[in-house]
Image (spheres, rainbow, N blue to C red):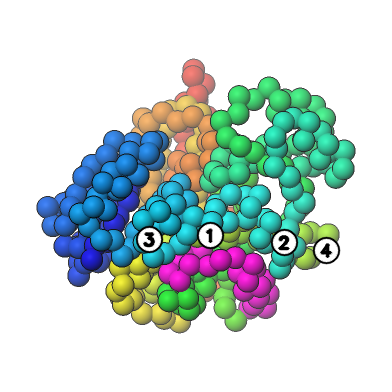
Amino acid sequence: MSILVLNSYDQHLNLEEIAPEKLSEMVVLTTPKLNNNHKFQYYEEIESISENECAESRIRELTKYYQFDSLIAHDEYDMVRAGRMRDRFGIPGQTEQSALSFRHKTIMKEHARQSVRTPLFREIQSIFDVYEFADEHGYPLIVKPVDQGASRDIFVIRNENDIKEFSKQKLKYSYEIETFIDGEMYHIDGLYVDGKEVLISISKYWNGCMAFKTNASLGSYQLSQNSGEFQEVYSFFQKLLTSFDCPEHVVYHGEVFREHDSGELVFCEIASRYGGGYILQAVEATYGINLKTEWLRSQCGLNMRGELKAEPLLHGFLLIPPYQGKLLDRPEKVPFDWVKIYDKSELGADFTNPRRSIDKAAGFMIEGDNEQVLQYRLNKLDAWMRSQFKWSAGSSEHH
């Protein structure tokens, strides 16, 4: 029996560290070169896997020589194609239809609204759908790609003129439109093994995923499992999952609004993969479980390596977006002992304005005793760090 691994982008994927027991059973198709590739059962580098279907053709050929009992793909853009290949070649795991429900935003909301409140929505076939949706539901509205991530190419529609501006865009994806939910937002990150819950971490956004549109920072902080806020979001999440065909071995990254006017929780999105930013690091620091490692190990049929621990400290993260221009100066160190990760950009690097919520000039993970401490520290760190940056945009320089 063999384990098929599809790796589109992760040049740091260390399969020898994650699952050394199964290394000799792995058939690996990858775009970036992986270390110690001679230890795999089979290894092949394929250029631009995520941009073509060469991997599908190659896997079709490889099924003549290997019997696959697992297919591992951890890039969000590979979830649906991995499900399609499992269906086609009889490999156990998440099906194409299950993957679509966690990937395609209108299909996702069709599932979600069976159990929880969702925004009103419609898939866009032409600009007339946008005008009609606005006539029916008013403004503001949100237009977003049905299958992209990190808040890429999202448009806020506040009036008819915004619709006209949207109509001028050269559209690269299929889009949907939905009613705008004004409120706070949470993200939920969890791990299930053999269909059983191992860990649920719930965080509250300090600044939401659209913050980068105004050059504000993106950040979040974990909620204590003992808090009423945690329990309310947790119950919403459990109810939500009843609407989906859930894989046996899965990590979830979900987002939920709390509407300002009503105080009600409203569904935003859910994905069957781990979140970005410093979510993996924050969850592991608090709970002792690496979501990515344990998810991949479970798909290899291996026992968990990490041990769930109590939450003596909570953690959060902060991503400060770049300006357009050259980074001239930034601090080498941060004078706060509660900053546990500081990823800094290279001096002299050229940046453009951020297109995604995870684009950053600097990234941090912080720790604190409780939610209030984390909020205070995110504010303090963001203000201090911004005062230290020096940028050059064309001929003008600014802090």
Q: Which of 348 and 80 is in front in this view?
A: 80
Q: What stretch is highlighted in magenta?
A: 227-253
Q: Which of marks 4 and 2 is nearer the N terminus?
A: 2
Q: Which of marks 1 and 4 is nearer the N terminus?
A: 1
| Residue 124 in picture, x, y percent from top left | 70, 37
Secondary structure, mark 2, is loop
Q: Nearer the viewer, residue 134 or 322?
A: 134
What mark, if any, has residue 90 been given in the picture? 3
Q: Earlier in the sequence, mark 2 or mark 3?
A: 3
Q: What residue type is labelled 2?
A: Arg
Q: Nearer the viewer, residue 158 or 1?
A: 1
Judge whether residue 212 is colored magenta.
Answer: no
Which residue is the site of mark 2?
113
What mark, if any, has residue 98 been given in the picture? 1
Q: How far apart are marks 3 and 4 (CA)?
A: 47 Å
Which residue is the site of mark 4?
262
Q: Which of marks 1 and 3 is nearer the N terminus?
A: 3
| Residue 219 in picture, x, y percent from top left | 55, 54
Write the residue at 27% across / 53% down.
63
Q: What residue type is labelled 1?
A: Ser
Task: Please state if 106 lies on the left or on the right of 83 as rendered.
Answer: right
Q: Tell us which disc is closer to us: 1 or 4.
A: 1
